[in-house]
Amino acid sequence: MLMMLEAKNIHKSFNKLNVLKGVNMEMEKGEIVSIVGKSGTGKSTLLHILGTLDRADTGDLYIAGEKIDSLGRKQLAAFRNHTLGFIFQFHHLLEEFNALENIMIPGLIKKENRKKLEFRAMELLEMMDLRERFDHKPNQMSGGEQQRVAVARALINQPALILADEPSGNLDTESSEDLHNLLFKLRDEFNQSFIIVTHNMELAALSNRYLTMENGILR
């Protein structure tokens, strides 16, 4: 199997607070790996480092065969846009744009052809069962619909890896189940890789594997 991610001896401190104390992690392409643990144990800090949104103090990180530590700021921004997708607990859709426009934003940043991008975004809306909502703005959609638009936005650049921080944490039970089923469908049908930080043990148990963050270490 192709190795999607490898993190070696990741350390991160904020002032004198040691948050990550030598984290090691590997995952293969097509896996869903969940990270669980109590609040304040460093889960989101690790996700930000794995998502290249922050840098470790020490340690090595490889994603899709690329050594992240060797990339400069502009190279890293381009790598993040081309290779990674992000889903957050709060969808962070732009209120002034409709569903189609929100999905297209990462592709526009990548300078993709607009017509091709619109076609791809409509395909994703179809996959999310939201085709009829393409011209709706976030305030015209339910929480579950908004989060599915956020998933489509994460997929628009066909990323190698998607990182999700409590993706169902702000949804009701039915919408959470729908979102979880969608993530597993994306894994099974498209071999999509996910790292998910979650407090939802049902989601964690359904993942390929789940790891527990405890005192700055993954176990």
Image (cartoon, helix red, strand yellow):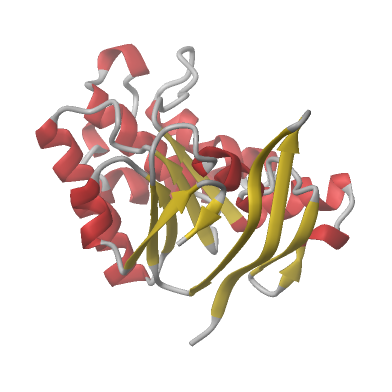
Q: For this view, does 85 lie left or right of residue 32?
A: right
Q: For this view, does 61 lie left or right of residue 174?
A: right
Of all residues, the one furthest to the bottom in this rendering is: 1
Residue 137 appearing in the image: no
Residue occupying the point 85% across, 57% down? 71
Q: x%, y% of residue 165? A: 44, 39
Residue 136 appearing in the image: yes
Q: For this view, does 108 lie left or right of residue 171?
A: right
**Pick the front one: 184 or 13:** 13
Height in image: 24 above or below 18? below
Using the rendered view, name the quadrant where residue 131 is placed. Answer: top left
Height in image: 3 above or below 69? below
Residue occupying the point 52% across, 46% down? 215
Q: x%, y% of residue 178? A: 16, 44
Residue occupying the point 31% across, 61% down? 186
**Pick the front one: 209 or 163:** 209
Q: Quadrant of the C terminus?
A: bottom left
Q: x%, y% of residue 214? A: 46, 49
The total number of labels drawn is 0
Using the rendered view, name the quadrant where residue 34 is placed. Answer: bottom left
Residue occupying the point 25% across, 20% down? 141
Q: For this view, does 154 lie left or right of residue 69?
A: left
**Pick the front one: 145 or 169:** 169
Q: x%, y% of residue 164? A: 44, 45
